[in-house]
Image (tube, grey):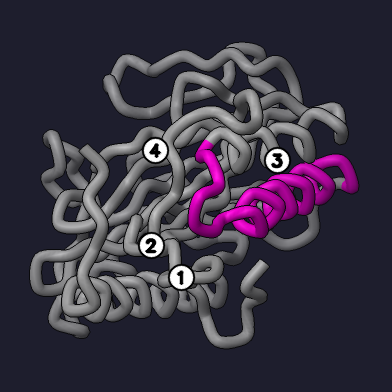
Amino acid sequence: MIICKSESELRLMREAGRIVAETHRLMAQAVKPGITTGELDAIAEKYIRSQGATPSFKGYNGFPSSICASVNDELVHGFPGSRKLNEGDIISIDIGAQYEGYHGDSAWTYAVGSVTPEVQRLLDVTEESLYAGLALVKPDVRLYTVSHAIQKVIEAAGFSVVREYVGHGIGADLHEEPQIPNYGIPDRGPRLKPGMALAIEPMVNIGERYVRTLEDNWTVVTQDASWCAHFEHTVVVTEDGFEILTKLPEQPEA
């Protein structure tokens, strides 16, 4: 069942989204060669808690940290720890915050210093695919039309869409219906309705689309060791389009 949110629920989700967005601002400032992923986690948790919220991920199904920190060929669910970032790395940071019972969720992939042109293109295309999907979000559009728009941008660039992991509904629960793949046939899937809150999150590999999970049972890496990127916003369907709940004021709507 897809839950449409009331205005009172959306007020709480906007605050959760603001906290997530501001935490990403701190991450963007802190990501530099030499910092450890554990230090990034500590910065994020301190800020989230300072805002009267709690990290959505910490303790979720046993996940030990406040952020997911996935480096280079790690796609999602990487554990923060003692790993130091090096010049030329990329890091995907996924952040969730729960505020008065409601969640916001956003991921961004950051360059550590200067990266190769191919890696920069991966980041640019993945972000572009997110906004291409968001641009189609409005009432009565079928969900997989959004998915197809994301897929088209990624595959036109010669990159691969990961299929094992998808976006999701969000609200009082971190993961709600519907599941939102980053590929699909247009004009299929549930119709979007005002009040639906969605976490849309393209996950893209430079190489083949296949991934595997490491022995920690969390960290997902590409099978061919190619690098990958992950961008995500939480949005709500409005009467005439959408609103990004995890956007900083200077970021575009689409």
Residue behind mark 1: 239
Residue behind mark 2: 194
Element marked by disc 3: helix
Mark 3 → mark 1, Cα distance in angstroms: 21 Å
User: With respect to residue 163, does 125 lie above or below?
Assistant: below
Do tag 3 and tag 4 residues touch (Cβ < 8 Å)? no
Residue behind mark 4: 78
Name which of mark 1 and mark 2 comes first in the sequence: 2
The percent position of residue 183, horizontal first and vertical second, equals: 61, 27
The amino acid sitting under disc 1 is Glu
- The image quadrant where one finds the C terminus is bottom right
Residue behind mark 3: 149
The amino acid sitting under disc 2 is Pro
Mark 1 → mark 2, Cα distance in angstroms: 6 Å
Q: Is residue 137 magenta?
A: yes
Do tag 1 and tag 4 residues touch (Cβ < 8 Å)? no
- The mark closer to the camera, 1 or 4, is 1
- The image quadrant where one finds the N terminus is top left
Instruction: Assign the magenta stretch its main secondary structure.
Output: helix
Task: Please give left or right for residue 88 compared with residue 234 in the image.
Answer: right
Element marked by disc 4: loop
The percent position of residue 152, horizontal first and vertical second, equals: 77, 34
Q: Which residues are magenta?
A: 117-143
Q: Quadrant of residue 78?
A: top left
Task: Please give left or right for residue 223 compared with residue 20 in the image.
Answer: right
Name which of mark 3 and mark 2 comes first in the sequence: 3
